[in-house]
Image (cartoon, rainbow, N blue to C red):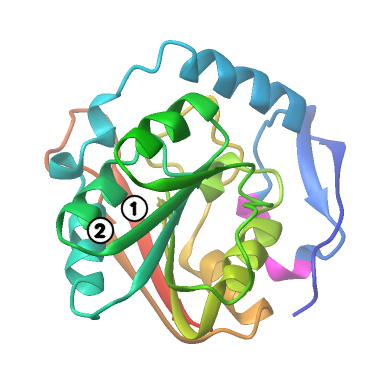
Amino acid sequence: AGVINECFFKNKNNKKVIYCNNDSIFSDLMYDRIIMSNDDLNKLYNEIYHDNVILFDEFYDTRPGMRLLANIIKEYHDAKVCDIACGHGMFVKHLSDLGIHSFASDVSEVRCKHLENDNITCMVGMAEETGWESDYFDFVTLQECLEHVINPFLVMKEAHRIVKKNGIIAITVPYYDNCSSENHVRLFLENDLYSLAKALGCRQIKIMKIPYLNWSIEGLKADSLLMTCVK
């Protein structure tokens, strides 16, 4: 596997799609999607974050993936955990309530400020550059994040940088076109996540399909993939 450092736009079947300088890492499915530029994405996220509304699918009690990861993490004593692209921070708030050393990062200053008010340190920054020091965390989580970013390898590389040797990276993404949204710029199958982890030399890679929400919605496919891997 190679390393993706540069991505670029080009036309495919009359659509504007993204390609990177080593497409062999990912399947074609990952790229066959209309996408926005980083500037367009940032503008969209700022509009979403402006009123700081908590969406129905952000709550800990509605997301099986959050609860599964929390059950894994709480088995490790004195672990330091960072949730990249934490949103409103429901996951790290729950971990903090359990007495787990919880940290976060997010592009939204508003959301980070709210977490700071709850005594949770949150770095303001893009998922590709969180600002945390290297080899610092025992767990790094990326929940429903990679489908929103132009270059998922750079985000995964950042998670790999800030997690300790033998630390665990945990990722959830929608399964292929499940939970479709206008601001999803990536599609993932199992081999795409596996290739990301292998490209960084991760080991003990485990991937499973899980429900995104506690309930099903008629006409909506709502499964996620969960991957854990060790640095």
Q: Which residues are magenta?
A: 24-30
Residue 109 placement, left or right of 18: left
Residue 148 visible in this rendered orientation of the protein? yes
Q: Which residue is mark 1?
A: 224
In the rendered image, the vertical position of residue 132 relative to residue 46, given as above or below: below
Residue 89 is inside the magenta segment: no
| Numbered mark located on residue 210 in the image | 2
Q: Is residue 86 left or right of residue 41?
A: left
Please tell me which residue lies in front, 182 or 46: 46
**Does 65 sit above or below residue 44?**
below
Q: Nearer the viewer, residue 47 or 22?
A: 47
Identify the residue at image location x=84%, y=60%: 5
Element type where label 2 sits in the image: strand
Q: Residue drawn at (65%, 54%), measured in percent from left and top?
A: 131
Q: Position of residue 114 (x, y in %)?
A: 37, 30
Crowdedness near tag 1: few (<14), some (14–19) or many (≥20) residues, C-alpha within 10 Å: many
Residue 119, given in percent of the width and then of the height, sits at 33, 44
Q: Relative to residue 78, is residue 180 drawn left or right?
A: right
Q: Amino acid at mark 1?
A: Ser
> Disc 1 versus disc 2: distance between alpha carbons?
5 Å
Closer to the chain start, of discs 1 and 2, is 2
Image quadrant where residue 180 sits: top left
Looking at the rendering, which quadrant does residue 116 occupy? top left
Q: Amino acid at mark 2?
A: Ile
